Image (cartoon, rainbow, N blue to C red):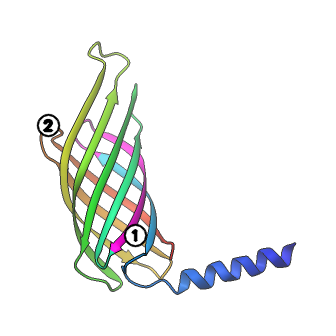
Amino acid sequence: MNSKKIILSFIFCTASMMATAQYKGQWRASNAYEWSFSDNLFGMNFTAEYFPLHYFSVVPSYTVFLPASGKASSLDLHARYYFTEKMKQFYTLAGYRAYYYTNEFDELGTKANRSFSFGVGGMLKFNNALGINPEIKYAVPPGDDLVVKLGIVYFIN
């Protein structure tokens, strides 16, 4: 039983070491901290990234914010275009953002904003398996929100 785990671990490590730059069919996963400045909220972000074309990716993400009272979350769907593919990768993004905030002490109920967002980011690779991902995006009105994200990226294949 232990030898199977060792062999599977070795295969997984070898496959992750062979990961290359952003090419068609590649997958990435990210776990990040995110700051939303409109409501001054901090949260945890979970992101997946898939490359249907070279240098172009589709990026769905979900963020759970931690307000002092109530609940807040955001659901994003962005497209990224990468300008570089080495150890330092830079991209621009554009997409859709749905943001929900419910304050239990507010009589107005849930605040919901759906907006177009755009921004820039980078990928600083430590090796072919891990990297760090800083990102800044802005949601145009009615959202009108600046979001800063810093995360760890896992290169799946």
Marks 1 and 2, how far apart in space? Answer: 30 Å
Please indicate whether residue 41 sits to the left or right of residue 152 in the image.
left
Q: Position of residue 18 (x, y in %)?
A: 52, 87
Asked if residue 27 can be seen in this view, the reply is: yes
Task: Give whichever of 121, 42 is nearer the camera.
Answer: 121
Quadrant of residue 126 within the rendered picture? bottom left
Magenta-drawn segment: 36-52
Q: Amino acid at mark 1?
A: Ile
Residue at figure coordinates x 35%, y 71% from the top left: 52
Q: Residue furthest left?
A: 141
Residue at figure coordinates x 30%, y 78% from the top left: 89
Quadrant of residue 43 within the rendered picture? top left
Marking on residue 132: 1
Q: Secondary structure at mark 1?
A: strand
Q: Which residue is mark 2?
A: 142
Q: Amino acid at mark 2?
A: Pro
In the figure, 121 relative to 83: above or below?
A: above
Q: Residue furthest right?
A: 1
Badge 2: residue crowd in 10 Å (few <14, some 14–19, many ≥20): few
Please indicate whether residue 113 sits to the left or right of residue 22 in the image.
left
Residue at figure coordinates x 24%, y 58% from the top left: 136
Q: Position of residue 13 (x, y in %)?
A: 62, 81
Asked if residue 68 can be seen in this view, the reply is: no
Please tell me which of labels 1 and 2 falls first in the chain: 1
